[in-house]
Image (cartoon, rainbow, N blue to C red):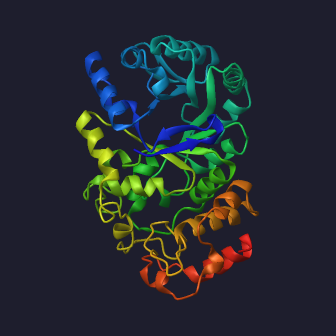
Amino acid sequence: MKYREIKRCGNIKVSEIALGCEGFIGKSREEYISMTDKAFELGINFIDMYTSDPEFRSNFGAAIKGRRDRIVLQGHIGSAWENGQYLRTRNVEKVKIAFEDQLKRLGTDYIDIGMIHYVDGMEDFERIFGGKFIEYCSTLKQKGIIRALGMSSHNPIVALKAVETGLIDVLMFSVNAAYDMQPPSENVDDLFESENYKNGFVNADPDRTKLYEYCAGKGIAIDVMKAFGGGDMLSAELSPFGVAFNEYQCIEYCLTRPAVVSVMAGCHSAKEMEKLAGYYAASKADKDYSAVLSKMDKFKFHGNCMYCGHCAPCTAGINIADVNKYLNLSLAQGNVPETVADHYRIMEHHAGECIECGRCEKNCPFDVEIINKMKKAKEIFGY
């Protein structure tokens, strides 16, 4: 297992493959404990707990008893339980009751990441960030009851608006190759609507690209939901592209997006966890998402660096995908963020070392003008 830092949460390190809570729901307490044991065995230390189900919270509390310090918990603010069922609420009194119940049932006095429960509409965003809801969240953070503040969303415009407030440390966002071609919508169902993909798309949605690059430039971590599109991406019949991806291609795609630190997977068994952890032993071919993306007629990523690494090996030893990522981040910001400059500085080889042999361009499945990109990077970074 590999780990990435959430810089705005005390530089804690989270596993690149993490767990969504849906795989636990409906299981016995003994199964919760055995699944948590397996997660620790595999090196998984990060879990998202969107559900307000009291049984989940109590059982998971039992599973982590005595080992709270081994796990990073992402608990949602605004996910409540009422009349025996889940409720998304903005009523601050209900929010408080639900959050305090979460702490009690988990047997902890803090949550690492307090996640404002999903916000997809602009009106909802304004209600949350303009009133008592955000005041409550800020109080939780000031008291150390949450170590970082997050927000979950499926809408890149609303998500960008939220991170631009400077209050959000972690963004939980829906990411996969299909969703990244969808324009923003306040209706999450649009992401799943096959009719919206019927005529194809050309290149990634600019609002999503801008969101990822902004987060990377500001040190805001993204943890991914819907990496497999609810399973649709893994089926040729259900995939919006009409082509099946495998789990490792989906994970690789997400982990190569700017700012992404972790992929939340809804594993329902120890076997499923083991399969996903097999990502690290998988061959380069098994993880190669470009093998699918570059062959689809209706869906084009032409001219855009997808950070897939096919440009390698570079004759001069340059990590071209990383140079392009740092270049894109700087162009998006209109300047070179300090963190980006530092990442670029410590690279073993830099864009200025490009000998313009063209080997990389012949290898690129997306027809990126890499030589021009290297020239631009040299101009931006100075070497």
- x, y percent for residue 310: 42, 73
Using the image, determine if residue 196 lies above or below residue 349.
above
Using the image, determine if residue 92 lies above or below residue 319.
above
Asked whether residue 28 appears in the rendered view, the answer is no
Q: Residue at 57% across / 15% down in the picture?
A: 94
Q: Residue at 53% across / 38% down in the picture?
A: 13
Using the image, determine if residue 241 lies above or below residue 277.
below
* Number of marks in picture: 0
In which image quadrant can residue 16 be found?
A: top left
Quadrant location of the N terminus? top left
Q: Residue at 72% across / 70% down in the picture?
A: 381
Residue 173 or residue 19, whichever sits in front: 19
Residue 362 or residue 37, whichever sits in front: 37
Q: Residue furthest bottom?
A: 357
Q: Residue at 52% across / 89% down in the picture?
A: 357
- x, y percent for residue 107: 48, 12
Quadrant location of the C terminus? bottom right
Using the image, determine if residue 286 lies above or below residue 352.
above
Q: Is residue 369 left or right of residue 8?
A: left
Asked whether residue 106 appears in the rendered view, the answer is yes
